[in-house]
Amino acid sequence: MTNKMTNKEKAEIILECLEEYVQIDWNFRGIYVKAIDKALIKIAKKEKAAN
């Protein structure tokens, strides 16, 4: 059994890493997570289409 991460969990990690390079306004966390989630869905669709 694998514990697959949700896109929200992935987005949180991306934001934490991004904060090392740019200033993140954590008041907009929900918007950032939503945007990253959308990007991860697009990436998954493109990867699926390429296979």
Image (cartoon, rainbow, N blue to C red):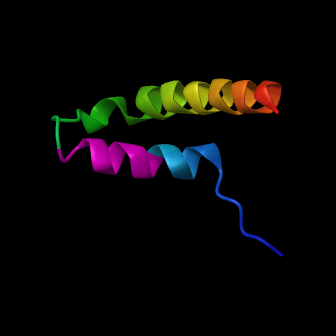
Q: Is residue 6 left or right of residue 39?
A: right
Q: Is residue 41 left or right of residue 21?
A: right
Q: Is residue 2 left or right of residue 18?
A: right
**Image vertical order of residue 47 relative to residue 14, above or below:** above
Q: Is residue 34 left or right of residue 26?
A: right
Q: How far across and how far down the image is residue 21, in percent?
A: 17, 40
- Find out whether residue 19 is within the magenta segment: yes
Residue at image position (65%, 51%) is 6
Q: How far across and how far down the image is residue 28, in percent?
A: 34, 29
Q: Main secondary structure of the magenta part?
A: helix
**Image vertical order of residue 1 relative to residue 38, above or below:** below
Stretch in magenta = 12-20
The N terminus is located in which quarter? bottom right
**Image vertical order of residue 45 relative to residue 23, above or below:** above
Residue at image position (61%, 44%) is 7
- Find out whether residue 34 is within the magenta segment: no
The C terminus is located in which quarter? top right
Q: How far across and how far down the image is residue 23, in percent?
A: 16, 35
Q: How far across and how far down the image is residue 8, in percent?
A: 57, 45
Of residues 43 and 41, the one nearer the viewer is 43
**Image vertical order of residue 3 relative to residue 48, above or below:** below
Of residues 46 and 27, the one nearer the viewer is 46
- The extreme bottom residue here reads 1
Q: How many numbered tags mark residues here?
A: 0
Residue at image position (53%, 49%) is 10
Q: Quadrant of residue 46?
A: top right
